[in-house]
Image (cartoon, rainbow, N blue to C red):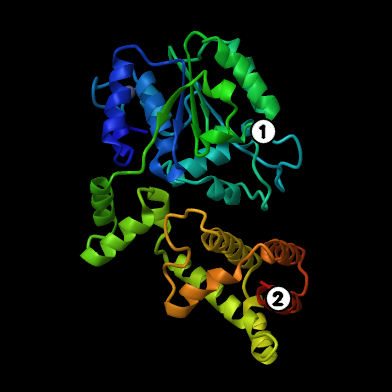
């Protein structure tokens, strides 16, 4: 990744480049900010620049030297990537980053390094399990440290979403961070600095990755949507709030479809007692969709419900969770999601997805889900 491929963040890039050029780069840094602000992109650009053999000092890596070419494809042998993993249908036990490296490379490349942990979970097919960085990952780092870097003078240990390290892994990493290793830099990223143990925090140089500034966002949006009106441009910028991943997801066709289904499911469920026929017809229509499609629909559903709950409880969210919906639904719906029913709705969503996965009769399953959902929403 070149610095020029990192969106915005000009000030931060300059600051980091000058520290590297002056040979003052610390042995461990923590980039903290939302993934969509460019944590990972920045981490990869830093690693590539450090390792580049023909860098344009003060500006960027060359992009051409053997090291840059390997970094560009994330296949440099001195780039070690650690990230949260779960067990999956193909990795049934002992999950660790090393077993997912190819998949992670592909994932990061497809997304230009602007990707969220949630997207990664979907990509690795974690099936709603929460990813963890465990002690096996830390052990891998330790075993690498006993070796010399393979090709470069410096090797990079990248830990993406480092707050997902469990206690055992944190302890082990802490010991490593206590003493700098020659020819090794650690680049950690996090969206939740407060979840990293203080002893680890005190051993890394903390760097805040801020939201992408408005001027850069305007340029990015104009490049993505050359014919956009000023009003639409302003809306996108305010919704995305400096987050490039959010910007990418605002208006795709699929997003629009998922939003409409979210509205329909709730509308139909809420009138279950009076319009049961309409409900069964809708359930049958939904049941014709593929399993993957339905799984995504209910992922989206649970996610949006979560946002509505936070919004309803005045937990700061950057924008209205249903900003795309019209009038009454947008104004009223979040108030239906309360502490009384949120757990039940999560469980119902999960159960529905399980049933979908195991090939239960989809029409009966979905009819049942819609009725139960109606009951839960009535019971706020
Ligand atoms: Zn280079």
Return the x and y of residue 109 as percentages of the image width and height.
45, 42
- Looking at the rendering, the quadrant in which ligand 1 lies is top left
Q: Which residue is mark 1?
A: 96
Q: CA distance from mark 1 to mark 2?
A: 36 Å
Return the x and y of residue 288 as percentages of the image width and height.
64, 77
For image coordinates 27% across by 32% down, the residue present is 11
Earlier residue among tags 1 and 2 = 1
Mark 1 vs ligand 1: CB below 8 Å: no
Return the x and y of residue 63 as percentages of the image width and height.
31, 29
- Tell me where residue 68 sits by quadrant: top left
Q: Which of pointers 1 and 2 indicates the residue nearer the eye? A: 2
Q: Is residue 185 above or below residue 94?
A: above
Residue 64's mark? none
Is the C-beta separation of discs 1 and 2 under 8 Å?
A: no
Tag 2 secondary structure = helix
Return the x and y of residue 343 as percentages of the image width and height.
70, 61
- Dividing the image into 4 quarters, which one contains the N terminus? top left
Q: Nearer the viewer, residue 74 or 236?
A: 236
Q: Nearer the viewer, residue 189 or 294?
A: 189
Q: Nearer the viewer, residue 14 or 354?
A: 14
For image coordinates 62% across by 15% down, the residue present is 175
Tag 1 secondary structure = loop
Q: Is residue 134 above or below residue 108?
A: above
Q: Which residue is mark 2?
A: 366
Q: Is residue 287 above or below residue 110?
A: below
Q: Is residue 251 visible?
A: yes
Direction from residue 332 to residue 293 in the image, left or right:
right
Direction from residue 3 to residue 78 in the image, left or right:
right
Q: Is residue 135 visible?
A: no
- Dividing the image into 4 quarters, which one contains the C terminus? bottom right
For image coordinates 50% across by 13% down, the residue present is 149
């Amino acid at each position: 990744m070149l610095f020029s491929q990192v969106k915005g963040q000009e000030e931060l890039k300059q600051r980091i480049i000058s520290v590297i050029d002056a040979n003052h780069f610390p042995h461990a840094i923590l980039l903290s900010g939302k993934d969509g602000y460019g944590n990972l992109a920045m981490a990869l650009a830093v690693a590539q620049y450090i390792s580049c053999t023909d860098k344009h000092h003060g500006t960027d890596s060359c992009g051409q030297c053997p090291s840059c070419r390997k970094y560009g494809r994330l296949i440099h042998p001195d780039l070690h990537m650690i990230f949260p993993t779960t067990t999956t249908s193909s990795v049934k036990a002992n999950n660790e980053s090393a077993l997912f490296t190819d998949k992670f490379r592909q994932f990061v490349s497809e997304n230009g390094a602007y990707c969220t942990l949630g997207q990664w979970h979907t990509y690795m097919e974690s099936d709603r399990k929460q990813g963890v960085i465990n002690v096996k990952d830390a052990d891998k780092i330790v075993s690498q440290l006993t070796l010399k870097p393979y090709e470069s003078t410096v090797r990079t240990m990248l830990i993406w979403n480092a707050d997902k390290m469990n206690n055992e892994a944190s302890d082990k990493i802490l010991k490593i961070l206590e003493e700098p290793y020659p020819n090794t830099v650690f680049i950690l990223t996090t969206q939740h600095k407060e979840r990293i143990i203080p002893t680890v925090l005190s051993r890394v140089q903390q760097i805040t990755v801020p939201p992408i500034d408005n001027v850069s966002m305007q340029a990015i949006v104009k490049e993505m949507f050359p014919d956009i009106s000023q009003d639409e441009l302003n809306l996108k910028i305010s919704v995305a709030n400096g987050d490039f991943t959010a910007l990418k997801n605002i208006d795709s066709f699929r997003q629009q479809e998922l939003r409409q289904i979210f509205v329909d499911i709730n509308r139909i469920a809420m009138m279950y007692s009076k319009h049961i026929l309409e409900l069964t017809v809708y359930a049958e229509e939904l049941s014709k969709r593929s399993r993957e499609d339905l799984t995504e629909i209910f992922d989206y559903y649970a996610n949006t419900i979560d946002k509505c709950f936070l919004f309803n409880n005045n937990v700061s969210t950057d924008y209205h969770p249903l900003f795309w919906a019209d009038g009454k639904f947008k104004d009223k719906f979040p108030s239906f999601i309360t502490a009384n029913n949120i757990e039940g709705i999560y469980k119902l969503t999960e159960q529905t997805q399980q049933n979908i996965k195991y090939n239960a009769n989809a029409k009966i399953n979905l009819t049942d889900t819609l009725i139960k959902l109606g009951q839960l929403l009535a019971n706020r």
